[in-house]
Amino acid sequence: MRMLDNGLIPYTRLGSQSYRYMRLDDVLEYKKRSEHDRREAFDQVHEIMDSMDVSDSVLADYVQQFN
């Protein structure tokens, strides 16, 4: 509901009902965007850790915290 309230996925209400209707294409587009953003953030973390000579095993332990 927060994603809808924050405008991340468009929705429609019919009449005065409290139900929210979303188009499948909009939900899939949001999923695609969020996966892209997550991948981009990971790449940035990887670049920073590489510049600090952090090993891949330390990076893997760090990433594991978020799974």
Image (cartoon, rainbow, N blue to C red):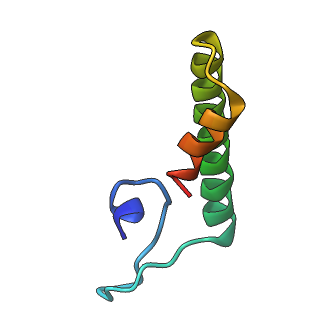
**Residue 13 coordinates in the image, percent (x, y):** 40, 78
Vertical placement of 17 versus 13: above or below?
below
Vertical order, 61 against 1 (above or below): above
Quarter of the rendering containing residue 15 = bottom left
Q: Give left or right: position of 30 versus 8.
A: right
- Nearer to us in this view, 7 or 50: 50
Residue positioned 33% across, 89% down in the render: 17
Quadrant of residue 19 within the rendered picture: bottom left
Relative image position of residue 16 (x, y in whole percent): 29, 86
Query: On the rendered structure, is 8 left or right of 49?
Result: left
So how many labels did they put on this image?
Answer: 0
Determine the residue positioned at 61% across, 71% down.
23
Residue under the image location 35 percent in, 54 percent down:
6
In depth, the one of 60 and 26 nearer the eye is 60
Find residue 31 and report its horizontal and vertical position in percent. 64, 58
- The N terminus: image quadrant: bottom left
In the orientation shown, which residue stands out farthest toward the top?
Answer: 51
